Every structure is written in structure tokens, then in C-alpha cells.
Image: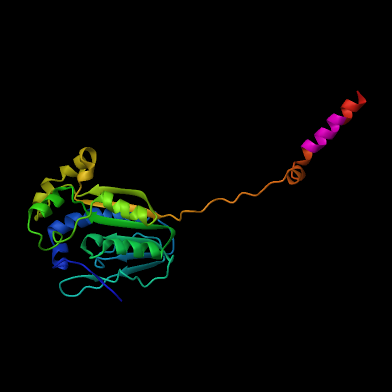
Amino acid sequence: MPYCKLTVLSLNEWFAGEQANYVLKHEQDYFDHTVSDIFGFNALQMGLPEHDFLRNSRMPLRFTAGNQPSNKVRLCCDELPFASDSLDLVVLPHVLEFAENPHQIIREVARVLRPEGNLIISGFNPFSLWGLRRALGRKQGYPWRGRFIRLPRLKDWLALLGFEVAGGRFAAYAPPLNQAKWLERFAFMEKAGDRWWAVSGGVYFLHAIKRVHGMRLIEPKWKNGLVSKLLPATPKLNNRISQKTNDQQ
């Protein structure tokens, strides 16, 4: 089975650090809240198997795709081992920006999702302090070696594959600092960011629904004779009484 290789090093090490915990707190909160309101039977999390972003899902069957060698992650995402139109929910936490072919991943997700199925994506925002750090610094280690995807571009990909954006948000407005005490000093930026510069959060979330276009309501071809037969009995009776009264007059 083909693999989509993630161009990251020391993923476990980074997620064990204080900088990653700051991001993960926001991501866990968003996934916990969003997946709890999505109903169905089968849910799939692709990537970051160490973190359960489906823990609040009410779906009875929940799967995680991904195995983890020593220093890099590989996901079986180019060809998912699921039948077409078989899943109700797929979550992609930071998969696309570290994949060799992110558009192919979305195409494969579109294949396995049922009509009206849900897709939730999290990614690093290139138009943020985190994106600025990546642009100006050395692109080594996680997450700086990833290719941060612009949100408008991601929306275009989804639209081409028949998805409709249903919601989303930005989070993690503080600078990408390495120590928790410094991140806490910038906690005021969370509320301020949501109000004043909402599109500049370090991470974004996107909730999309797979739509099946071309469907239309088939209306019956009514005939005058059929319509007259379906008229209520009371109006017909009233018409007869009115006619009889007129004849007597």
C-alpha cells in the first residue's frame, strides 16, 4: 500500500514540548466540541495517533490511520483501506502540510466519505506569527519543515471535490515561544485575536461537508382529471347544495 511520507523529524519530541502543548490544547478543545455534534456510524482519524481527537465522538466505530517509526511518521493515506462512501467522519490533524501530495489525500477522503459526510482539518496558518517564524527562520524540525497551506487554497481544493465549508475558526494567537511561562504571558492575545485579528491565529480549523450535486426533486405530473378526483368531499358536497338551492330559486 502506498504511503504519504511526512517531511518531519522528531515528531514525538516536539509534541512532548511546551510549545506543542499550547497548540494541542486548542486543537483538542475544538475537536472535542465539534465531533460531539456529528452523528453517524464510522469515524476515522488520520495522523497523530498518540492524541485521540475522536474521544468525544458518539459514533460506535472509530479508526486511527498511522504508524510511527523511530523518527518520522508515515500515514496510509494515498489509498485508504475503506470502501467508497463508507465513512461518516474523517479528521485530518496536521496531515496535509506534511504530505507529499495533500490534494491526493483530500481526493481519497472524498472517495471514502458518504454523501453528507464530514471532514475536519487542522493546519498551521501561514499568515500568522507561526507562519512568519517559518518564513524567516530555518525550516528544520517540526513544524517548520512543513508546507503551510493557505486557507483560501485549501477551500478551493475542497470545492473542486464537492465539499461545502460548514464552519471553522482560528486559534493559538500567541507567538511560537518555547516555554510555557512566556506563552502564558501572551494569553491575552487569544481573546484579542478572536476580536481584532481573527484570521491571524497560528492554527486554523476547517469543517466541510461532502455534497452530492446534480440531485433534484422529482415532481409528479398532475392531470386535471386526477386533481378533481383528489378534491376533498366537503367542497364537492357544498357545490351540489349550492347548485340545488339555485335551481329551487
Name of the residue lying farthest toward the top: 249
The quadrant where residue 51 appears = bottom left
Instruction: Judge by depth and name the residue closer to the eye, 29 or 121.
Output: 121
* Residue 233 painted magenta: no
In the picture, measured across the screen, residue 45 lies left or right of residue 125, that is right
Q: Which residues are magenta?
A: 235-243
Q: Residue at x 9, y 50 (%)?
A: 182
Which of the image's four quarters has the N terminus?
bottom left
Q: Would residue 55 be seen by someone viewing this image from the given angle?
A: no
Seen from the viewer's position, the closer of residues 98 and 45 is 98
In the depicted view, which residue is nearer to us: 94 or 52?
Answer: 94
Q: Quadrant of residue 121?
A: bottom left
Task: Estimate the x, y position of residue 140 in percent, counting from the top left.
Answer: 10, 62
- Which of the 4 image quadrants contains residue 117? bottom left
Is 238 covered by the magenta stretch?
Answer: yes
Q: Is residue 237 left or right of residue 151?
A: right
Vertical position of residue 59 compared to residue 198: above or below: below
Q: Is residue 213 visible?
A: yes
Q: Give the side of residue 168 with respect to residue 12, left or right.
A: right
In the image: residue 180, left or right of residue 214: left
- Kindly give the residue lying farthest to the bottom in the view shown: 1
Residue 192 picture location, percent across and down: 19, 40
**Residue at point 33%, 71% (across, down):** 79
Picture residue at 34% right of the left edge, 70% below the top: 80
Query: Measured from the top left, where is residue 170 in percent x and y?
Result: 25, 48
Which residue shows up at 24% across the image and 65% down it? 48
Q: Main secondary structure of the magenta part?
A: helix
